[in-house]
Amino acid sequence: MVGIVGYGGYVPRLRLQRKAVVQANSWFNPGLKAYAKGERAMCNWDEDSLTMAVEAARDCLGACQANDLRAVYFASTSMPFADRQNAGILSTALALGENLSTLDITSSQRAGTSGLITALNAQTGIGGQLLYATADKRRTKAASQQELLFGDGAAAFLLGASGTVADLLGWHQVAIDFVDHYRGENEEFDYTWEERWIRDEGYLKIVPRALKGLFDKTGLKGEQVDRFIMPCVLRGVPEGIAKRAGIGEAAVANQLQEVMGESGAAHALVMLSDALQAARPGETIVLIGWGQGCDVLAFRTTPAIAGASKPRGIKGYLARRKEETNYSKFLAFNDLVTREKGLRSEVDKQTPLTTLYRKKDMLLAMMGGKCRVCGTVQFPKANVCVNPNCGAFHSQDDHPFADTPAKIQSWTADQLTYSPDPPAYCGMVVFDEGGRFMSDFTDMDADKANTGQKMRMVFRIKEHDDARGFTKYFWKATPAY
Amino acid sequence: MATGIRDKVAILGMGCSKFGERWDREADDLIVEAFEEGLKDAGIDRNQINAAWFSTAIEEVHVGKSGVPLAVALRLPYIPVTRVENYCASGTESFRGAVYAVASGAADIALALGVEKLKDTGYGGLPQRNRGVLQSMHWANLSAPGSFAQLASAYQTKHGVKREELKRAMAQISVKSHDNGAKNPKAHLQKRIDIDTVLNAPMVADPLGLFDCCGVSDGSACAIVTTPEIARSLGKKDLVTVKALQLSVSNGVESSHNSWDGSYFMTTRKASERAYKEAGISNPREQISMFECHDCFSITELVTMEDLYLSKEGGAWKDVLDGMYNADGKIPCQIDGGLKCFGHPIGASGLRMLYEMYGQILGRAGPRQLKNPVFGMTHNLGGFPHQNVSSVAIVGRQDA
């Protein structure tokens, strides 16, 4: 039976303290005080939906065995490229090869769940395994309610027909052009209608219809549901819907609102990933995806979930956190304020696409080389082996560095170079198995800047070429976790 | 077998412009300022120069590419002019070109001139520039101080030096250079500073504070070289000859192979070993009278003292604090004020260093004059500690 073979998640390390937002903005909108509790996950300046999806996928693939991967699907409403396949960047960054079906799924908060249904259905045609990732970086207007309620996050799943930890029991979709909010083409922000109408005419009428569809198809009953996953920032709505459907109150999953905020199209799957990490065999999980209609999926966990190795997961990434109390930094990272960046920031950042294509494995997948003659691993891969005692020509095979542990040999905190988050930490990182390179550091704290500090490579934004709307990606080192 | 450059070429004349924020001067003005002094010193006519080497590194935007900017500025009579660029060793590279031309017999008299006009950017520090098509996509986002600062963390780890101890030695390096620069009217910065000022300065790239960094300035310097025989025939008596000219260039080992520990310059060690051999110097600590090393940052100077084999490995920070490199110390370093006080107009710096060594040997250094110097050494280091170009030149009295 088709289902979930593995799962993973990612939540950015920075957690903006909501009270900092409220303190800054309640002069303007006193109503925000109602949302001052807890924290929201916030991307570092060099994170976006794609980098989060890469991390979630690494988390997933690091814990389960991908042995017949045939497709990579990516769902988000905040993809970095409108016309350059984001799933293709994802699969390249993960070094998954080129014999893949790749697809982006977008345009609705329901994209996360609709994409999952599509991917599960596609398995029948494609066969083997599919990697499905979803992420959203939620950009909102300053001083809006959404700014407080939303958060950034990602989840990823390996799907297949064997070795599953959760089997798909069934699904149902209803498509209704109910416009609770929208974001027009080329618009920066959402435009949102009244909450009471969204609740009464939207959620409370449409979700039950979708649930009924699922129950009719599968014969499932409300009381059989062990985990009811329904993201909704309107308080009490999931509980009300569950009750009317006969689903026990205890089954209603935590929204993670206090600890990360609602991560858009990804959030249902962030919650699903989190639920799977805690689930025991034989549990029935019902998942709701909302947006111009409603998706419902039902899974049942298999006996295999008990023995399956667990990823870091949402739980682990929620625990890897750093409180951010500087609201100005959040505004800056999300380009919500015009900063004086200085003349140093003005260097032309054009990316020659020819070079990027030639070096895509090096730049996007951190692929280096290993010398067949002397065994030396090195980054970047070169025509001539760097080992001074070897120097063989054309002797190197591809060798991946992305998952190789490293340590700091030398470092600095650079105040002079332009960085969106000064000081720019960087240093020589030395890989445990050989090889090294001068690397940018990210998610860095002053007390971690030491020679010998253990580091891990992460896929991040190198820089933005604002003049051309191009985002450059590369790998950076971050303190190992 | 190669016999080396020792005593095959003599310096006929040298010139050096005032270095600084030359807001009122174009590059060609600076070229002429240095050249007129050098030509007068050489005592020749401009048309006697057979060939020229011209160094400018990163600000070709202002100066222009090729040999043309030099030929046009000086109205050179259609002679060969070659532009050279080799990071911060560019000035020494132009000298090397001119010296080799004379040594080969291809030219009787050759000119090396370097210029850089850095102060047309609108901000402090070196001009920001694209690192290259591929490099810009993966090189770390680091400034020049950001790359050199890393020597400190690796040096501390290797030698077990405390941060405070190293910071104090680095500060003393800057204090010493300012003491010297205060006596040099051509220096950009001519004020003395105290150690607390250095230690308390704002951080640029940890652990380098503002006064651990050399200045950024406009400037030009030149050398006119010929054979000792021609020099004598032109009436020169006390000849300063070239004793060694060496260059070492990283091949990627430091940046990609784990055999380098990040605390020293592989290239400078190679270049200085070869230079001492070429110059016939067997005990540099005793034989080198003075030197100008590439003090782009205090920590660069500190580790270079070891890489030039003047201090023992791990011992330079103590030698610095003991005053070994002060003007009245055993081996005065940056007696003209160094990059620290001159700033670093890249194409000119190597020649500016040679200008001081030449002047000192000829007894022309005024209030900075050292007693009876015999061998003067200059050193340039361009790029990053993990990937660089290092030059070492030694000049001296012909009879030494």
Image: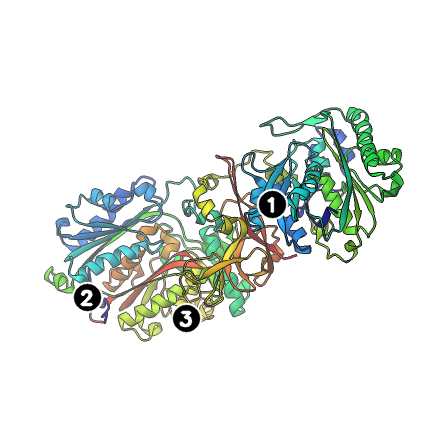
Is residue B394 placed above or below B138 in the rendered structure?
A: below
The quarter of the displayed image where residue A138 is located:
top right
Nearer mark to the viewer, of 1 and 3: 1
Q: Which mark is residue A51?
A: 1
Q: Position of residue A125 (x, y in %)?
A: 65, 42
Q: In the figure, is residue A295 to the left or right of B279?
A: right
Q: Are marks 3 and 2 in contact (CB under 8 Å)?
A: no
Instruction: Identify the element where label 3 is drawn.
Output: loop
Is residue A298 placed above or below B295 in the rendered structure?
A: above
Q: Residues within 10 Å of mark 2 (few under 14, many from 20)?
A: some
The quarter of the displayed image where residue B337 is located:
bottom left
Q: Which mark is residue B311?
A: 3
Q: Chain of mark 3?
A: B
Which corner quadrant holds the C terminus of chain A? bottom right
Mark 3–mark 2 distance (CA, rounded to whole Å): 30 Å
Nearer mark to the viewer, of 2 and 1: 1
Mark 1–mark 3 distance (CA, rounded to whole Å): 48 Å
Residue drawn 51% across the image and 60% down it: A436
Q: Position of residue B370 (x, y in %)?
A: 30, 65
Instruction: Identify the element where label 1 is drawn.
Output: helix
Instruction: Identify the element where label 2 is drawn.
Output: loop
Q: Residues within 10 Å of mark 3 (few under 14, many from 20)?
A: many
Residue drawn 49% across the image and 66% down it: A375
Q: Amino acid at mark 2?
A: Lys
Circle 2 residue = B8
Q: Is B278 or A46 nearer to us in this picture? A: A46
Q: Amino acid at mark 3?
A: Ser
